[in-house]
Amino acid sequence: MESDKINIGKKYKVKTNNSKKIKARVVSVNDSSIFLQKGKVKKIVLLSEIKQIRKRKFSYLKTAAIPITIAVFFAYGISNSLDLNIGEIQAPN
């Protein structure tokens, strides 16, 4: 593991030797360990315990899918709560 290739402030996926997976932002790196932060939780991982580390990639598709999915469910919920009988013909009594 070469600590000089890790960018401070970027998000990484870290897999340790005991198969633990951590997705967090790198706060700092020294010769023996890496300091990670996820939300308010800070973790220290020894470089010797890291099996794999990859830079997280931003997904435009996933980011766009979230608001679209919310809008569809919201519209579906509104239409069901209003009970609009669109497309139905009612016979006069």
Image (tube, rainbow, N blue to C red):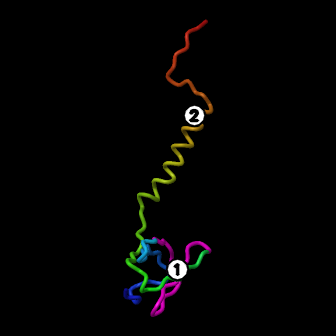
User: In what element is the residue under mark 1?
Assistant: strand
Earlier in the chain: of badge 2 and badge 1, it is 1
Could you tell me residue 44's position as x and y percent? 53, 83
Q: Is 46 situated above or below 71?
A: below
Q: Is 67 situated above or below 78?
A: below
Q: Which residue is located at x 44 percent, y 75 percent?
A: 12
Q: Is residue 24 magenta?
A: yes
Q: Is 69 situated above or below 16?
A: above
Point out which mark residue 36 bears: 1
* Type of the residue with mark 1: Leu
Residue 6: quadrant of the picture: bottom left
Residue closest to the eye, 1 or 90:
1
Could you tell me residue 49's position as x and y percent? 43, 82
* Type of the residue with mark 2: Ser
Q: Which residue is located at x 54 percent, y 38 percent?
A: 76
Quadrant location of the C terminus?
A: top right
User: In what element is the residue under mark 2?
Assistant: helix
Magenta highlight range: 21-40
Q: Is residue 93 left or right of residue 60?
A: right
For disc 2, the marked residue is 79
Q: In the current view of this chain or complex, which residue is farthest to the top?
A: 93
Residue 75: quadrant of the picture: top right
Secondary structure predominantly adopted by residues drawn in magenta: strand
Point out which mark residue 57 bears: none
Quadrant location of the N terminus?
A: bottom left
Q: Which residue is located at x 51 percent, y 77 percent?
A: 25
Could you tell me residue 73's position as x and y percent? 54, 43
Query: Closer to the camera: disc 2 or disc 1?
Result: 1
Query: CA separation, marks 2 and 1?
Result: 45 Å
